[in-house]
Amino acid sequence: MTTTARHKSADSQLDLPGQTHVAEGPRSLDGMYIMHFGFRRTLDDFVDGVRRTPSTEAKAWRAMAAYWDGFATALHHHHDIEDVAIWPVLLEHADAEGDAEGRETLEAMEAEHSVIDPSLAACHAGFADMVSHPCEDHRRALDVRVTALREALGQHLRHEETAALPMVQATMSAEEWAASETYAGESFQQRSIPFVVGWVLHELPPEARRRMFAIAGPAYRVLALVLCPRFERLHRRAFRHAAGAPVA
């Protein structure tokens, strides 16, 4: 998959492939949009991989199961940041301003998260089934689960980008946004670093990659030199049967 970042100026928000809206404003939403790009890209990979990988390819299924756990952890952390440090702040502003539509949007954000979490767990169980007892029945069941999750998460990201992130720009102060970023850093699980560093950068367009290094700081660039090759090997093992996959 070849992708290109689209942006208007050095100060504009990122507009990445698959993104449904750009919420211009004073807060940099680069990190949000980069994560959304990764979630969309990864679920496309999983849907294709589950459909194309023969049930007899044990190594590929073990790699996909490991990849899934890393991806699911990243998505859980992303949603935790929103549930703890962003949506409640926006809800306070909405209620203070008597913004009934804003409250409805934020209640929908939480409700959508509550649908996605059990879907993640169902997919985890499906990958475990393919590792422990690979068969066509389990593969087809997993195809249904992963496809359903891609649809549910795609709808959620679209709703978030078009309705919730504009509220961030309109109502969150610099201090409130900084507090959410602090929580994101403090709540991040260090054991996730080996997967997440490479996962975030995988197929990320050049301008978004530049901004990611600016967000994360010099240490991230050093880690990327070490960890990206390891991640890319896992990606090739997991999706070697997917459309357009490089020869391992």
Image: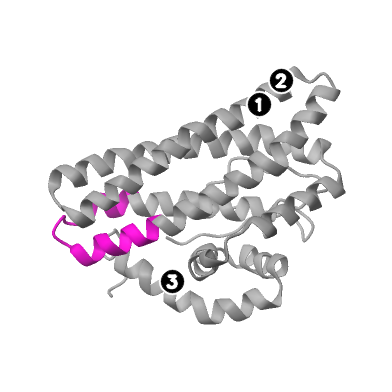
Give residue 141's position: percent from left, percent from top: 23, 40
Q: Residues within 10 Å of mark 1 (few under 14, many from 20)?
A: some
Q: Is residue 48 magenta?
A: yes
**How far apart, in angstroms, are the residues tagged by discs 1 and 2?**
6 Å
* Mark closest to the chain's N terminus, 1 or 3: 1
Which residue is at 77% across, 36% downward?
89
Q: Is residue 215 left or right of residue 75?
A: right
Which residue is at 60% across, 68% downward?
206
Q: For mark 2, what is the residue?
A: 101
Q: For mark 3, what is the residue?
A: 231
Q: For mark 1, what is the residue?
A: 105
Establish if 160 lies above or below 40: above
Residue extent of the magenta highlight = 47-68
Task: Identify the amino acid type marked 1.
Answer: Thr
Q: Is residue 62 left or right of residue 148?
A: left
Q: Secondary structure at mark 2?
A: helix
Q: Quadrant of residue 246?
A: bottom left
Name the quarter where the C terminus is drawn: bottom left
Give residue 104's position: percent from left, percent from top: 66, 21
